[in-house]
Image (cartoon, coloured by chain):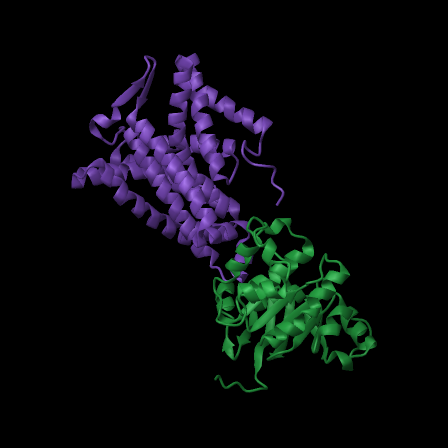
Chain colours: A green, B purple
Amino acid sequence: MTQRNESAPVLDVRDLTVHHGQLRALHGVSLSLPAGGVHAIIGANGAGKSTLMRTIAGLHRPTAGSVLLDGADVTALRPERRVAAGIALVPEARRLFASLTLEENLLVGQTSARPGPWTLDEVYALFGWMRERRSQRAAQLSGGEQQAVAIGRALVANPRVLLLDELSLGLAPVVVRQIYDLLPRLVDSGLSVLLVEQDVSQALRVASYAHCLLEGRITLAGHPAELTTQQIEAAYFGVGVSA
Amino acid sequence: MSWVNAIIQGILLGGLYALFACGLSLMFGVMKVVNLAHGDLAVVAAYIGLGVIAITHVPAVWAFVIVVPVFAVIGYVLQRTLLQAALDRGVLTTLLVTFGLSVVIENGLQQFFSANSHSINIGSLVSDSFSIGSQITIAYLDLVILVVAVVVLLGLQYFLSASASGRLIRAVADDPEAAQISGVSYRHVFGIAAAIAFGTVALAGLAFGMYSQFDPTIGTDQLLLFAFEAVVIGGLGSLWGTLAGGILLGVAQQIGAQIGAQYELLAGQLFFLAVLVLRPQGITSRKETA
């Protein structure tokens, strides 16, 4: 048995500053993710949401700040090593391996897998349609199906933290809802979810905690139930004064 | 009958071109590296083979056993260092770097081996042949090279489609960044792909060294160009296409030679240009959608 302090965050982002060339995309962003639960980051286009996710996954090098997983500093690790450490990203626009089959996509996701509950069989059980279509090329799947495969590819690595970047992008609302309704089952399996979403109502519906990002800074944080619409609007668009 | 012979000789020659093109096709298909030093590397392999045979006095076939693995290691190391560093700075940088490599290799070879041409001595095998009818003569060496080319290309195709390592190579070819977040070190996989590509370059270089005379400049003057043409004719990134492209180029050249010896190269280039105009995606590829 591992002895884990209940209050210790599984993911800790400290004072993260990221530049894209001359442009500063994130200004000293800090957040910590308690084990279990769904954290949402909302914000408008260009607020730095995807940059934050990609930096946590290791695809961007921060100019300053650090990323800690279970208290261990992973800031210097390459993305593939972070997967082995327990961070898996479902990237924006899904980014499946288009010429590989559905099953091959999942198998690639197992390359640096940690031991854990998520196997190919478990993913096939989660998404009932997948097993019989596992030999199809990823490029032949619909957008919603591709999103499911992208989630499956991340799950089979058995991450401690699952990063979901803009799940709803380009998908029909009913499909988005189906995918979001799966999140409690993922959390029950022992992982924590950090998701980024432009669709605020969708994000707040499923989140146990929410951060709002505006121009690279966190402008609001709290439990969704405790945030008022005015607060969120102010934090989202940067109008008026937020507390 | 002499036309049939021309086509058969073209197919045999095409095996050698396909072998040359294989590594070029793989490096471009996986890393998007256009290796302008490809032909020179093949010539280096031939010279090393020459040296290995001269020093150890082993039969020529043993040169393959030594040189191919050495080249695979060189390929891995070069990919992880120089080529990866170039890739990190953009795809165009790899053109400059491999062009530079080509110049360095050519001048190095001139310095150490002089501009004289050499050939790997394989005794009577180079001229042994059998005849079909009165007009068609097939050299054993040509046939062996064609068989090796077919085995290597089909074997590689099978390796890529059926093995776990092949799956990773296809994955990084599709999207290196997505591979990273799936837990795959794309740099390592690039290195493996380069090792395979360099191994086939060595194979092609040694085969060429037995087939024909070589000198320090022939890598860029001829081999690189033919390899390029085979890859483009077949369709970029497709190994099946590369095999077909090599053979078609060989056949075009031999048909040209049948018309008149001075038309051998011209016919090959004209065929290449015709493919570029009429079917720029290559004869075996569908139009790329992704």
Residue nearest the observer in this picture, B217 or B68: B68
Residue B240 spot, x, y in % from top left: 48, 37
Residue A180 spot, x, y in % from top left: 70, 68
In which quadrant is the N terminus of chain B drawn? top left
Residue A164 seen by the camera: yes
B51 relative to B161, above or below = above
Q: Which residue: 44% across, 17% down?
A: B256
Q: Which residue: 69% across, 78% down?
A: A209
Q: Which residue: 43% across, 21% down?
A: B253
A49 relative to B46, above or below = below
Residue A15 spot, x, y in % from top left: 60, 75
Q: Is residue A211 left or right of residue B74?
A: right
Residue B11 spot, x, y in % from top left: 41, 25
Q: What is the total number of numbered labels drawn onto the structure image? A: 0
Quadrant in the picture for residue A212 = bottom right
In which quadrant is the C terminus of chain B drawn? top right
Residue A20 seen by the camera: no
Q: Which residue: 79% across, 69% down?
A: A237
A100 relative to A79, above or below = above
Q: Is residue A2 left or right of residue A16?
A: left
